[in-house]
């Protein structure tokens, strides 16, 4: 049985759909700004159509990018931190986990930041990526309690300034959140951060730790892979 093409019944070409999704997810642009950018290129699409594309086809495009990932995330050191997000006036917590190279391992949305939530996050991470050599967090007591239950206290690190890398990594999400005028459902937040983290892993490289020639090489590889996906 042949695989069904998810772009088959759309009037616009797959290239235009993927390009619109990439603009919206990768850059801190509003739906109307993406509409204007496409209009300047002779593509007449409404912002509501772009919203629908991101909702329905964004996960598919993100999955294509993930399959093209050049290397697996590192298990040397993980950084974990929670972002405070308000949804309909109610406080939620977005747990973001990156490795020492800045690759986003996963994102989780919970209503609490207690021991049970941390334990759930850690179990899923270890199941999907294996056990790391070190986990760096802030001094939230829930981390210590959860790691004690999972026998991971020996790899837990909480020294000051050690977790600055993930604090900086939150900026991508915060810019996007501001442009989207917040989220209305926890499910939408979880779905969007999964898509955004995939694009972030693919396109964003560590400028400050790479020499210019190597950085240009990495960027060219990312663009070439994206061009392959765009015309696939």
Image: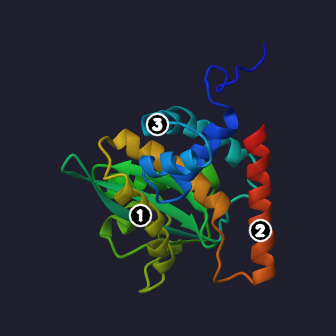
Q: Secondary structure at mark 1?
A: helix
Between 41 and 224, which is closer to the camera in this rendering? 41
Mark closest to the chain's N terminus, 3 or 2? 3
At x 34%, y 49%, the residue is 110
Q: To which residue does mark 3 refer?
A: 46
Which image quadrant for residue 173?
Answer: bottom left
Query: How is the model colour-coded?
Result: rainbow
Q: Are marks 3 and 1 in contact (CB under 8 Å)?
A: no
Mark closest to the chain's N terminus, 3 or 1? 3
- The C terminus appears in which quarter of the rendering? top right
**Is residue 96 something one can see in this rendering?**
yes
Q: Residue furthest top?
A: 1
Q: Is residue 137 above or below residue 15?
A: below
Q: To which residue does mark 1 refer?
A: 175
Q: Residues within 10 Å of mark 3 (few under 14, many from 20)?
A: some
User: What's the distance in space between the residues labelled 3 and 2, CA to CA?
Assistant: 34 Å
Q: Secondary structure at mark 2?
A: helix
Q: Residue furthest left?
A: 89
Between 139 and 89, which is closer to the camera in this rendering? 89
Q: Are marks 2 and 1 in contact (CB under 8 Å)?
A: no
Percent x, y of residue 5: 70, 23
Q: To which residue does mark 2 refer?
A: 218
At x 38%, y 68%, the residue is 144
Percent x, y of residue 199: 60, 54
Q: Is residue 162 above or below residue 95?
A: below
């Amino acid at each position: 049985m042949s695989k069904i093409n998810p772009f088959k019944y759309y009037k616009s070409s797959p290239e235009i759909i993927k390009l619109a999704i990439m603009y919206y997810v990768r850059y801190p642009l509003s739906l109307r700004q993406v509409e204007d950018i496409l209009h300047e290129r002779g593509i007449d699409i409404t912002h509501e159509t772009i919203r629908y594309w991101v909702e329905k086809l964004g996960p598919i495009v993100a999955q294509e990018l993930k399959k093209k990932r050049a290397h697996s995330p590192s298990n040397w050191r993980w950084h974990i931190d929670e972002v405070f997000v308000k949804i309909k006036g109610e406080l939620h917590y977005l747990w973001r986990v990156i490795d020492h190279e800045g690759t986003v391992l996963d994102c989780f949305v919970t209503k609490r930041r207690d021991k049970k939530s941390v334990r759930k996050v850690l179990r899923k991470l270890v199941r999907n990526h294996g056990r790391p050599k070190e986990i760096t967090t802030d001094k939230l007591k829930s981390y210590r309690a959860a790691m004690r239950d999972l026998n991971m206290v020996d790899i837990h690190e909480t020294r000051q300034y050690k977790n600055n890398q993930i604090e900086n990594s939150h900026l991508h999400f915060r810019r996007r959140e501001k442009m989207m005028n917040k989220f209305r459902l926890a499910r939408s937040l979880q779905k969007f951060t999964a898509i955004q983290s995939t694009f972030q892993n693919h396109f964003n490289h560590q400028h400050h730790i790479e020499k210019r020639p190597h950085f240009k090489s990495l960027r060219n590889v990312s663009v070439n892979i994206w061009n392959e996906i765009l015309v696939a």
